[in-house]
Every structure is written in C-alpha cells, then in structure tokens.
Amino acid sequence: MRLSFAVLVLLLIVSITWALWDDAFPEWRRYQHELHSREITRLETELREARAALERPEVRAELARLDAQLQTHDEDSTATWLQLTRGQLTEVEAEIDEIRRAIRDADRRLQDPVTVALQREVTLQLETVQEEYAVATGIWPPDTLQLARLWTVGDSIAEVLVSIEGPAHELRARLEERRAEAQQLRLDAVG
C-alpha cells in the first residue's frame, strides 16, 4: 500500500510539473517570437529605405520649398490674426465702456434718495400691516387670504426693486465677461 501511494505521489508530482511547464512555455510563444523578429526586420528595412529616400536631392529640395512656403504662410496668418484680435479688443473695450456708463447710471438711480426713501417706506408699510394684523386678530401667521394680500404687496415691492437693481446686475455680469474677454485678447496679442 505504501509503495502504491509513493508511486501515485510521484506520478502526481510529475504531472503537476509537466502541466506547469506546459503552461509556462506554450508552443505558440515560439511562433509569436518568430513573427516579432520578422516584423522587426521588415520595419528596419522600411526605415532604411525611407531614410535613403529622404536623402535624395529632389526630396530635399521639395522639403525646403515647403518649409519656406509654410514659414511665409505662418507670418501672413499671424499678422492677419493680430489685426483681427486688435479689432475685437477695440470692440470689447468699447462695449466695456458702455457697460460701465450704464452701471454708473444704475448705481446713481439706486443711490437716489427718493428711491432709497421709497424702498424704506414700502418695507415699513409691509411690516406695519403685518404687525397690525397680528395685533388685531391675535393670529400669527395671518390667515391665507390676508397672507396672500400681504404677499402681493411684497411681490410688488420686489418687482420695483428688481426693476431698479436688475439692469445693474446684468450690466455688472456683462462687464465681468467683457473684462475677461479683453484680458484674454491682450494675452493672445502679446503671446
């Protein structure tokens, strides 16, 4: 029994070794290595032929002509691009000046004592109405009908404020966009 067990163990060790060897060194690897060697040889030959073709005088002359043509084209396109960029920069700067004037006008209207007083008055009236309602009814928050009326008054106040502040906010946003665009155009023109 021990002898048969020993023989079986040896057979198992031999079969496992054989399986690992066969897995580590499959037959197709030899073919793959041969294919890679042939491909490398073929590419080296093509590279030598391409280098030899580049050394021919007519190819060198054509490359020099194309380089000169490309250089001329680059200089022309750069000059044209700079003219367009300067024109765009001038337009953007003009629009920025226009936006700045509009913002100054909107700021003046917002700082106008009449507008400030109107805003304070309407806010005070809304607070007064809410307090009177709470005192008169003893209910807070007010019922939905009264609340809807109060919200309508508040909405009308908000509309007045938006009509005053809205254009200024939009103009500030446009100004920031144009400043960024002008800065980019300046960087492009310098770079």
Image: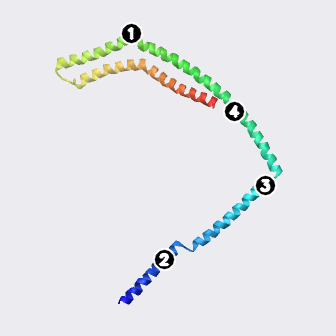
In this rendering, the answer to whether 52 lies above or below 169 is below
- Mark 3 vs mark 1, CA separation in Å: 85 Å
Q: Amino acid at mark 4?
A: Thr
Disc number for residue 114: 1
Q: Amino acid at mark 3?
A: Ala
Disc number for residue 19: 2
Q: Say which label, 4 or 1, has the lower sequence index.
A: 4
- Mark 2 vs mark 4, CA separation in Å: 68 Å
**x 45%, y 13%: residue:** 108
Quarter of the figure with residue 191: top right
- Say which of 55 and 181 sits in front: 55
- Mark 3 vs mark 2, CA separation in Å: 52 Å
Asked whether, in this view, residue 154 is left or right of residue 79, the answer is left
Q: Say which label, 2 or 1, has the lower sequence index.
A: 2
Mark in front: 3 vs 1: 3
**x 72%, y 58%: residue:** 47
Per the image, the residue denoted by label 3 is 53
Q: Say which label, 3 or 1, has the lower sequence index.
A: 3
